[in-house]
Image (tube, grey):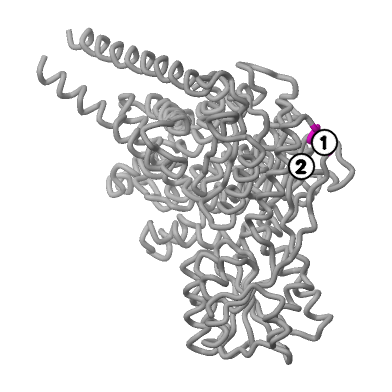
Amino acid sequence: MSNLKKILISLTVVALIVLSLKYLSHKQDSVSLSKDNLPIIAITQIVEHQALDQEREGVIDTLAKAGYIDGQTVKIIYQNAQGNIGTAAQITTQMISLKPKLVLALSTPSAQAALGPCLAQNIPLVFSTVTDPLGAKLVKDLYKRTEAVTGVSDNLPIESQIQLVQDFIPGLKTLGIIYNAGEVNSVKMVKAMHEEASKRGIQIVEAVAGKTSDVVSAMNNLVGKVQAVYVPNDNTAVAAMNGIVQIGEKHKLPVFAGDTGSVVAGAVATRGYDRFLLGKKAGELVLKILNGVPAGDLPVEVNHPLSLMINKDAAERMGVTISQALLQTATVIGD
Amino acid sequence: MNWIQFTGSVEMGLIYSLVAFGVYLSFRTLQFPDLTVDGSFTLGAAVFASLVTVGVDPGIATLAAIFSGAFAGFVTAWLSTHLNMLNLLAGILTMTALYSLNLRIMGRPNIALLGEKTILTEWFSGTTAFVSTHFLPLFLVTFLFGALLYYFLNTRLGLAVRATGSNPRMGRAQGINDHKMIWLGLSVSNALVALAGALFAQVHGFADVTMGVGTIIIGLAAVIIGEAILPTGTILKALLACVIGTIFYRLVIAYALNVGGFGLQASDLNLVTAILVACAMLLPSLKRRVKAFS
């Protein structure tokens, strides 16, 4: 008797699961195909982060200006892996299954997870916020193109970064860097920075932070050892920018950064890329592909205009004097 | 959810089933809450990727990944048994050390494997089942290691490991060296997890130092969900529950990715996943209530 009951209950449960799956799949199909087969643009992003979000907005803005408006002429599907690489891989599967016109991947791991499936299904892949597309094996060559993969590389010229600090601190001899040794972009940058600094007779002192909560102690470690601190475009360090700035102000240790968001948060200055602008460049690549240009014909975008941004308030609090010449060429905030 | 997405989730579930096996062995069999797995998952991928990129045969590289995981598990067990360290702390320490170690092994935080040989390209090239080239090899690997684990847990040695977990004092009275059993159990557990990491790297074409984050949570969730769905009276059923639980968890994530509407946005993914799993966990208690009424 109890056996019979068990069987009945399990059968009911199975039936319920099957029915709900069927209902869900039906519903899913109706969602994705509801707007009369609008072309789908799929965006996959590894984590919520200011730089990544700004680029995504840049892309969507460019598309909208060209008449590709989400829900009207095109369907934009955006998924975020919330920091989990396993989820990023699953997101790719989901996107591929919807047969999009192209996949846009923001960040290196998202692009790597999307690469295999996209190549297998002949779906063009556009990447952005990737510093080293060659090292990540996303493309074989930046200019001579074959595969249907292209994108925007945000590799910053290293000279410009050390020059930035030298512009503000003329007698620079020691420079501290805070970064996460687990971020591929940062590691590559710090390595190049060592080379460039030794050419200029500057000593680099590294402070490594494995996670955001370690950043403050890394910064404390640099106090008294260096004349200035540079924070590259490192997701971990940038996330704790406020903590870095507080210590910098307390000890009059000037902080420079690799992105504009950090200057808004209180770093003295940055010379770098406008993320929204990079997003627009990625958006233009997307547009070209939508208009029928094969992705394999589009070279990877590498050189972008650099812009100087100064936070006057922060400079005062960290005891940095700024020359008029610099102020004239820069976007100045915090007056 | 369509067919591609379904098979994609099942594939991912098959990979993480090995993690669930490992977690089942440490948490359930040995009663040892072992957090090493966040590190050993990445370790497996790191060892595999570094070896394959210097031209080592992918089969040997995978084997090396398995042994590296076993070693990581051994370290945790040794810290616990010989330094009398709290189990949780021992696992946390190994996991923390592994982060730096994985960076050392890889030499950089991310290794791309596109164009490198993997066991998928070498041993299973051209096999297609259910519109996917990965399904069959992953199924075979999971089945093979599940069967091996089942066999192991039923040998005299495996029984000794189980006895150590359920009653260490009684085990000692029967002449079982419980320290050695913990070493063995955790080594096997982490070897399975490292294998999962190596497989992940091969299927998805890259190893990244952050890829292990949250592995323990996924493994644990899978074990518990599996237990809720299937009765787990015997080892065979328990291992089956691990596989079912992991695949179910992956299907839930796949479904959560599809939930549009209701004002949900992409950043709600983890919340939706959690709520769906919570709902699924209600099933057994509902089942009990239905039983109580009838």
Q: In which quarter of the image is the N terminus of chain A?
A: top left
Q: How far apart are marks 2 and 1 (CA)?
A: 7 Å
Mark 2 surroundings: few (<14), some (14-19) or many (≥20) residues within 10 A: many
B109 up-or-down from A114: above or below? below
Residue lying at the far right in this picture: please name it. Answer: A144
Q: Do labels 2 and 1 share a chain?
A: yes
Residue A103, by quadrant, is top right
The image quarter in which residue A89 lies: top right
Q: Are marks 2 and 1 in contact (CB under 8 Å)?
A: yes
Query: Residues in magenta?
Result: A293-297
Element under disc 1: helix
Label 2, secondary structure: give it: strand
What label sits on residue A189 in the rendered view?
Answer: none
Residue A177: x and y in percent read 64, 75
Write the residue at 47% across / 41% down.
Answer: B266
Judge whether residue B153 can be spotted in this image: no
Q: Is residue A295 magenta?
A: yes
Residue nearer the viewer, A118 or B31: A118
Q: Name the residue under label 1.
A: A296
Quadrant of the frame with the C terminus of chain A: bottom right
Give the residue at x 78% y 39%.
B116
Magenta stretch: dominant secondary structure: helix
* Residue kind at label 1, given as amino acid type: Gly
Report which quarter residue B108 is drawn in.
bottom right
**Amino acid bearing label 2:** Thr
Q: Nearer the viewer, residue B7 or A252?
A: A252
Q: In the depicted view, which residue is nearer to us: B77 or A306?
A: A306
Q: Which of marks 2 and 1 is nearer the N terminus?
A: 2
Q: Residue at x 74, y 60 (%)?
A: A155
Q: Name the residue under label 2.
A: A150
